[in-house]
Structure formats: structure tokens, C-alpha cells
Image (tube, rainbow, N blue to C red):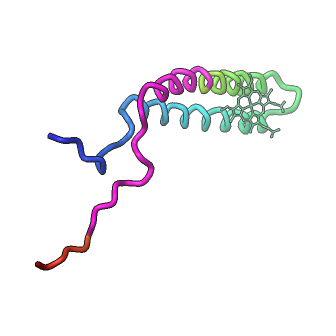
């Protein structure tokens, strides 16, 4: 069966990368804000900071293979193929 362009979507792997990157960016942001709740000179501040850096570096580690995947797989069109809705009567 011919693949329908309207059904074209990102591959499962690309979607996994997308949501993992989203989760780690959100985690990095959350952790840097959590750090703000700890007292300025306390040791407790280092943990969310380390977590923040780790989450950020994980984003970098995920983005590189994601870019390679993108180079080898053409993404689906942003706009779906237009299907004519007007029919002529013969
Ligand atoms: C997805 C990745 C990342 C996001 C979204 C992110 C976001 C942020 C945000 C919002 C702040 C607070 C800025 C402020 O209000 O002053 C911050 C601070 C900081 N981030 Fe990141 N960051 C990321 C990755 C990283 C990485 C990979 C590193 C280190 C290798 C890093 C090191 C720092 C440091 C040192 C600060 C300053 C903390 C301070 O004010 O003392 N970040 N980041």
C-alpha cells in the first residue's frame, strides 16, 4: 500500500529523543530554581547545582545523536498535504 503523506510523522526514536530532551531541560530548569531555596553559603546548594549541570550535559549528550538521526531521516512536512474538498458534478 502507498504511504499516505497525511499520516507521515516523526519516527518513534525521534519522538523519544524529543521528549527526553524536554524532560531534561525542564529538570535543569527546576533544579537551578530549587537551589534558590537553600541558604546562600550552605552545602545543600551544591546538590541541585550539580544536578543542574548533569541534566544540562545530558541534554547535550542527547542532542548530538538526535542531530545525526535527523541527518539520515527526512522529517515529515510541517503542513499536511492538502486534500481537495470541492467536487464537481458532471
Ligand atoms: C538545558 C540546559 C540548561 C538550562 C535550561 C539551563 C538554565 C539555567 C538557568 C535558568 C540558570 C539561572 C540563571 C539565573 O537566573 O541567573 C542557570 C544558571 C547556571 N547554569 Fe545552567 N542551564 C543549562 C545547562 C547548564 C550546563 C550544562 C551547565 C554547566 C556545564 C550549567 C551551569 C550553570 C551555572 C554555573 C549557572 C549559574 C549559577 C549561579 O548563578 O551561580 N547550566 N542555568
Furthest residue toward right: 41
Q: Nearer the viewer, residue 3 or 56?
A: 3
Rendering quadrant holding ligand 1: top right
Give the percent coordinates (x, y) of residue 55.
63, 26
Q: Establish if 19 lies above or below 59.
A: below
State the image quarter where residue 42 is shown: top right
On whether residue 80 falls in the magenta region, the answer is: yes
Furthest residue toward bottom: 89
Residue shown at 52% from the left, 21% from the top: 65
Q: Nearer the viewer, residue 41 or 61?
A: 61
Furthest residue toward front: 90
Give the percent coordinates (x, y) of residue 49.
74, 26
Q: Is 1 on the left or on the right of 71, as rendered? A: left
Q: Establish if 36 lies above or below 50.
A: below
State the image quarter where residue 61 is shown: top right
Residue shown at 11% from the left, 78% from the top: 90
Exactly how many numbered labels are in the figure? 0
Q: Which residues are magenta?
A: 60-84
Amino acid at each position: 500500500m502507498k504511504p499516505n503523506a497525511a499520516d507521515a510523522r516523526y519516527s518513534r526514536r525521534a519522538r523519544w529523543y524529543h521528549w527526553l530532551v524536554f524532560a531534561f531541560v525542564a529538570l535543569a530548569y527546576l533544579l537551578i530554581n530549587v537551589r534558590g531555596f537553600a541558604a546562600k553559603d550552605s552545602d545543600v546548594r551544591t546538590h541541585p547545582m550539580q544536578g543542574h549541570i548533569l541534566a544540562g550535559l545530558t541534554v547535550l549528550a542527547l542532542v548530538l545523536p538526535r542531530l545525526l538521526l535527523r541527518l539520515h531521516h527526512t522529517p515529515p512536512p510541517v503542513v499536511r498535504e492538502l486534500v481537495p474538498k470541492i467536487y464537481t458534478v458532471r
